[in-house]
Image (tube, helix red, strand yellow):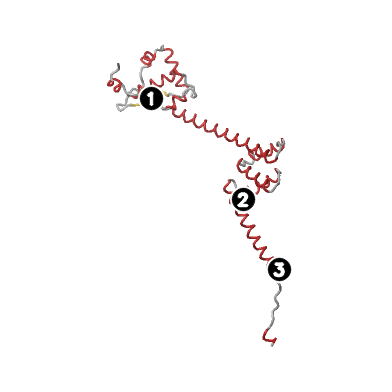
Amino acid sequence: MLAMVDYLTAGETVISNMILDNFNKLGMTPQELILYLKLRQYESKGNDFPDLMMISKEIGVSSEEIFSMLEGLLSKKIVKLTTHTNEQGQTGDRYDLTMIYERLDQLNKAKHVEESRQSEQIKIQELYQTFEKEFGRPLSPFELETISIWLTEDNYQPELVILALREAVLNQVYSLKYIDRILLNWERKNIKTKEQVAQDQKKRKNSLSEKEIASAQAKHEEDLPTVPLFNWAEDK
């Protein structure tokens, strides 16, 4: 049985789960992953340019295979061969194993871009479905093209188009021309978000309320009977 002291003194090679989970997406083969892990193991022991022949014996592959695996890591920008100068002024080669983090960062960014694209496609599809539900019929090719222009050329966000649709429905006007005028009006006011739309609607509501109050007061004054003015002093 392995003695605990032997286990503890053997040391550890720490590896991020991101590498284990995504090595195949980086184009690495399982054999190249094993070589990378061995290079990490030697690096943790202070040897950043280990003998490949020694590693080939440790993992049970031929010299041709080990060099082919290394070439794969270099060409895929997982590992980089660099030259450095030590404190004594001597130059030597070393394996830079940090390149993989740049590749993982690129992979992560590409993943977010794809997720964002898919999310946007879902929003657009839901937008078409909302229009068809509110209109009570399928959209015509011309209507589909008009909505597409709003999104791709006018750069209106799907959320803003939905709000314009709802305002048109509240006014019982089922027309893309009417919705287009709403969007143009918001564009002139630099309204781009749901919150800004709500503020604009509140402002218009308050303005209408003030006009209604003023109109009611004016009508009330018109309806009041005319009160004659008498000079009580002369009446005596």
Label 1 Cα neighbours within 10 Å, binned few <14 / some 14-19 / many ≥20:
few
From the viewer's perspective, tell me whether residue 113 is left or right of residue 182. left
Total marks in image: 3
Tag shown at residue 223: 3
Seen from the viewer's position, the closer of residues 109 and 51 is 109
Q: Nearer the viewer, mark 2 or mark 1?
A: 2
Mark 2 lies on a secondary structure that is: loop
From the viewer's perspective, tell me whether residue 223 is left or right of residue 157. right
Do tag 3 and tag 1 residues touch (Cβ < 8 Å)? no
Mark 3 lies on a secondary structure that is: helix
Q: Which residue occupies 52% across, 30% down?
A: 111
Q: Quadrant of the N terminus?
A: top left
The residue that disc 1 covers is 83
Q: Earlier in the sequence, mark 2 or mark 3?
A: 2
Q: Label 3 sits on what residue type? A: Asp
Horizontal and vertical percent for residue 190?
Answer: 60, 48
The residue that disc 2 covers is 189
Q: Using the image, determine if residue 152 lies above or below residue 205.
A: above
Q: Which residue occupies 62% across, 36% down?
A: 126
Give the Cα separation between the discs numbered 3 and 1: 98 Å
